[in-house]
Amino acid sequence: MKFIVNYWHKPSGKAPVEEYIDDIDSLEERADLLSTLKGIQENGTEAVGVVFRQIDGKLWELKIRTHGNQHRIFYVVVHGKEIYLLHAYLKKTPKAPLKEIETAKQRMKLLMEDHK
């Protein structure tokens, strides 16, 4: 099943996940991360190099390891195969920091209000 991957935008127009990816210093690492996202669009949950994990209700997480780093991207499925990337961070601790999950939940709430 293919996915339509969208970036959630703040009211200011900025897309936090897009900014996160743009801020990665290594061009190779950035390219690998973008390639993995393209793989999700083309192959859905069968994409190579990514693990999908449910966090809480509609909130899910993409676990992507590239160049020795563990990237986490929170997302929500809005309509069928349409997903929105809400928040990303570089994993440095065994469990997802509550602050990161709360940020994603707040953005999910705003998104869902817009899609009622």
Image (cartoon, rainbow, N blue to C red):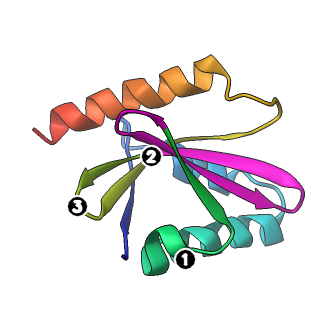
Rounded to the nearest angstrom, the CA distance separating label 1 from label 3 is 18 Å
Q: Which mark is residue 24?
A: none
Q: Residue at x 80, y 31 (%)?
A: 94
Q: Is residue 51 left or right of residue 110?
A: right
Residue 29 in picture, x, y percent from top left: 79, 65
User: Which quadrant: the C terminus?
Assistant: top left
Quarter location, residue 99: top right
Q: Which mark is residue 39?
A: 1
First in residue order: circle 1 vs circle 2: 1
Is residue 59 one of those drawn in magenta? yes
Residue 42 in picture, x, y percent from top left: 45, 81
Q: Which residue is mark 2?
A: 75
Q: Are marks 3 and 2 in contact (CB under 8 Å)?
A: no
Residue 107 in picture, x, y percent from top left: 38, 31
Position above or below: 18 against 94: below
* Chain part drawn in magenta: 55-74
The amino acid on which the numbered mark 1 sits, given as a three-letter code, is Gly
Q: Residue at x 56, y 74 (%)?
A: 47
Badge 1: residue crowd in 10 Å (few <14, some 14–19, many ≥20): some
Q: Residue at x 54, y 53 (%)?
A: 18
Rounded to the nearest angstrom, the CA distance separating label 1 from label 2 is 16 Å
Q: Which residue is mark 3?
A: 80
Badge 2: residue crowd in 10 Å (few <14, some 14–19, many ≥20): many
Q: Is residue 2 left or right of residue 20?
A: left
Badge 3: residue crowd in 10 Å (few <14, some 14–19, many ≥20): few
The amino acid on which the numbered mark 3 sits, given as a three-letter code, is Gly
Quarter location, residue 101: top right
Q: Residue at x 67, y 23 (%)?
A: 97
